Image (cartoon, helix red, strand yellow):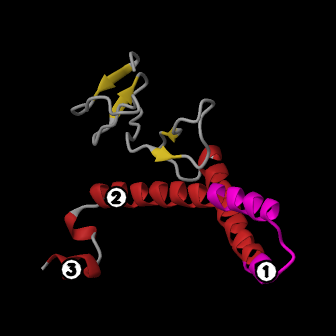
Amino acid sequence: MANLKKAGRHAEPNEQGFRAATERFVPRGGVTVSIHPRLLPWPGPTGQCSYLLTDHSDSYLSRLADEMEEVQLAMGIELLDHAAAMLEDRKAGGTEFRFLSSRLSEALRDALRVAESRGGRLAASEEDAEPGERSAADAGTAE
C-alpha cells in the first residue's frame, strides 16, 4: 500500500493479515478505489482467503468469480440429488458413502464461502447507500 495516498481513515490488520477499511484510497493517478473487499470463491495457494478490490462489478475477475460461484452452487445441488439416490440404493457401500461425504463437505464449504462473500457485498452496499436510498422495507424494520 506504499503507492496509495490515504483518502480516509485506515483500519488495523485483521486475523488473516488483510487490511480492511470502510473508506476509500486514492492511488497515484487520482482514481478512487473501493476498500470493500470481495471474498473470492476460491482459496489462495496455501488455502487462505482470497479477496478482490474493485469498484467494477463487471470486471473480468468479478465476472469469473460470479461464474465460479454459480458452478459451485450447481455442483452442490447435483451432489444432493446424487446423495438422495445413493441413500435409496441398498447396494451402496462404505467406500461410496465416504467419497460422497467428502464431496458433500467440499460443496458445503464452497456454499458457505459464497454465502459469506455475498453477505459481505450486501453489507458493503448498505454502508455505501445514502439514507434516502435505502428501501422502504429496510425503513419499516428499523422502526
Q: Is label 1 in a helix, a strand or a loop?
A: helix
Q: Residues within 10 Å of mark 1 (few under 14, many from 20)?
A: few
Magenta span of residues? 84-106
Magenta stretch: dominant secondary structure: helix
Q: Position of residue 104 (x, y in %)?
A: 67, 62
Residue occupying image coordinates x 73% and y 59%: 98
Q: Earlier in the sequence, mark 1 or mark 2?
A: 1
Q: Which residue is mark 2?
A: 123
Magenta run includes residue 92: yes
Q: Mark 3 is on which residue type? A: Thr
**Sequence order check, earlier mark of 2 and 3:** 2
Which kind of residue does numbered mark 2 sit on? Ala
How far apart, in angstroms, are the residues tagged by discs 3 and 1? 42 Å
Give coordinates of residue 72: x percent, y percent. Answer: 67, 59
98 or 138, which lies in front?
A: 98
Q: Which mark is residue 141?
A: 3
Answer yes or no: do the residues labelled 1 and 2 have beta carbons within 8 Å?
no
Residue 24: quadrant of the picture: top left
Whether residue 35 is situated above or below residue 96 in the rendered picture? above
| Quarter of the image that includes the C terminus | bottom left
The label nearer to you, 3 versus 1, is: 1
Left or right, 18 with reference to 10:
right
Q: Residue furthest top?
A: 2
Spot occupied by residue 85 in the image (x, y as percentages of width and height): 79, 80
Q: Residue 70 magenta-drawn?
A: no
Q: Which residue position holds label 1?
A: 85
Q: Tell me how far mark 1 sits from mark 2, CA to CA.
A: 38 Å
